Image (cartoon, helix red, strand yellow):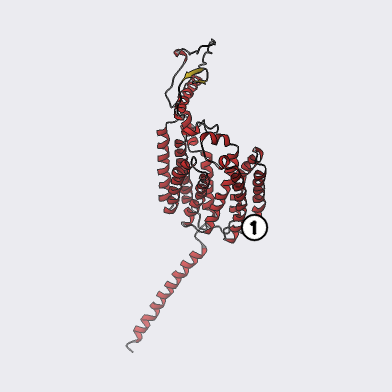
């Protein structure tokens, strides 16, 4: 088999996707090196029936992986899937802000940063495991590990350091419950969800659980416990991911099929459309439950009605038409829907606590006064009784 890359030809016998990745490593390194040094390869002389090879003097071979100096921070951002990690941190912040407890800037910062580091570690491990499959998809073929811009050892080391630092921040800077949720989510994403993508469509439901845990981490970081209000937030995040991801995966079916991923859009398109519609309606129901459980005021149910209704309408059009246009509209609006819904949650929160709840302070104060009065009464009564005793 002959591979054509840039201006040269490579004879190779490929047996596995890993060998294809290795050829891609050295080819990308050679081309990038020539571009950086201003070297323009000489065009090959065409002779019918013969394979032309460039002279060694015109080819600069670089070892794989090819690392670009000064791009380390940018590479770490790509390895951690910075935009996805940012969304995870935002939902964690929303959970912290919605919790019925005092807002503490220190624990808020530690909770947000720790969650971000754990998310970065999970994404790095995910990319490490999926190199042979990412190389077969148009959407992921240019990732760092696929193109050889970073070694697998470097990626795993980054993930280990990020996970250790993040979980330490959550445990020592926030509380044990938040750290346990973070560790559980890291395990769920890297050990169960990632390999399940090539086994069963159940991976979508498992992945939705992963996305629903960050607001629970924020809530637990602020309140120290989880209650019904936390489950409302987690339920909204869980349900939102089905119309969001199903719409995204609809136009990526050729890629997922080529790489061997078991997605609803590939193996069961009808279920993919129905699931997107059902969970978009479920979001409206969960939003209506928020004021009932004292998470928000009743204005929240009214204000979110148009937003959720339009989201459900787009999901219905996707269910009905099932074309690229309807799926793109649903996916793009989902990127607006979630931040808007989170802002409405915050704007309509039932109570804000900037210090310890007033009831707790009043309780402590009344207890202190009662103890003081009791001591004062004993001091006033006992001496009199003792003084009057001899009489």
Residue density around tag 1, few if under 14, some if 14–19, many if 20 or more, within 10 Å? few
Residue 226 seen in the figure = yes
How many marks can you see?
1
Left or right placement of residue 313 versus residue 265 in this view: right
Q: Compare residues 42 and 243 and report the one nearer the observer.
A: 243
Q: Where is 210 relative to 31, above or below?
A: below
In which quadrant of the rendered view does residue 121 lie?
A: top left
Residue annotated with mark 1? 299
- Which element is circle 1 on? helix
Q: Residue at x 35, y 86 (%)?
A: 388
Q: Where is 92 relative to 383, above or below?
A: above
Percent x, y of residue 354:
52, 56
Q: Where is 215 relative to 7, above or below?
A: below
Percent x, y of residue 380:
40, 79
Q: Compare residues 27 and 291 and report the one nearer the observer.
A: 27
Tell which residue pokes out farthest to the bottom in this image.
391
Percent x, y of residue 94:
54, 50
Q: Compare residues 300 and 31 and report the one nearer the observer.
A: 31
Residue 68 seen in the figure = no
Left or right placement of residue 319 versus residue 354 in this view: right
Percent x, y of residue 342:
58, 50
Quadrant location of the C terminus in the rendered image: bottom left
Q: Residue at x 51, y 42 (%)?
A: 85
């Amino acid at each position: 088999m002959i591979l054509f890359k840039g201006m040269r030809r490579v004879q190779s016998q490929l047996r596995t996707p890993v060998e294809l990745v290795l050829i891609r490593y050295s080819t990308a390194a050679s081309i990038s090196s020539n571009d950086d040094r201003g070297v323009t390869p000489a065009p090959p002389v065409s002779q019918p029936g013969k394979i032309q090879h460039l002279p060694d003097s015109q080819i600069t071979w670089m070892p794989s992986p090819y690392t670009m100096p000064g791009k380390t921070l940018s590479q770490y951002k790509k390895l951690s899937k910075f935009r996805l990690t940012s969304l995870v941190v935002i939902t964690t912040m929303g959970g912290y802000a919605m919790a019925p407890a005092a807002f503490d800037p220190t624990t808020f910062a530690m909770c947000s940063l720790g969650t971000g580091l754990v998310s970065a570690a999970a994404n790095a491990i995910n990319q490490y495991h999926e190199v042979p499959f990412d190389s077969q998809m148009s959407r992921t073929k240019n990732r760092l590990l696929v193109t050889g811009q970073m070694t697998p050892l470097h990626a795993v080391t980054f993930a280990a350091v990020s996970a250790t630092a993040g979980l330490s921040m959550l445990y020592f800077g926030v509380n044990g419950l938040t750290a346990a949720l973070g560790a559980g989510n890291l395990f769920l994403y890297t050990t169960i969800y990632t390999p399940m993508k090539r086994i069963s469509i159940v991976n979508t439901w498992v992945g939705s659980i992963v996305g629903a845990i960050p607001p629970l981490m924020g809530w637990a970081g602020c309140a120290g416990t989880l209650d019904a209000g936390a489950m409302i937030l987690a339920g909204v995040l869980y349900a939102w991911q089905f119309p969001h991801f199903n719409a995204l995966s609809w136009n990526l079916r050729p890629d997922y099929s080529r790489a061997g991923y078991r997605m609803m859009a590939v193996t069961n398109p009808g279920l993919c459309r129905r699931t997107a519609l059902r969970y978009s309606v479920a979001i409206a129901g969960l939003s209506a439950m928020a004021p009932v459980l004292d998470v928000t005021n009743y204005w929240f149910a009214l204000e979110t009605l148009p937003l959720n209704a339009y989201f459900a309408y787009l999901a219905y059009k996707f269910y009905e038409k099932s074309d690229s246009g309807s799926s793109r509209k649903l996916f793009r609006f989902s990127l607006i829907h979630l931040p808007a819904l989170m802002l409405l949650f915050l704007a309509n929160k039932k109570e804000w606590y900037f210090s310890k709840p007033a009831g707790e302070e009043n309780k402590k104060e009344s207890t202190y006064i009662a103890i003081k009065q009791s001591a004062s009464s004993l001091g006033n009564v006992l001496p009199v009784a003792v003084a009057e005793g001899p009489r």
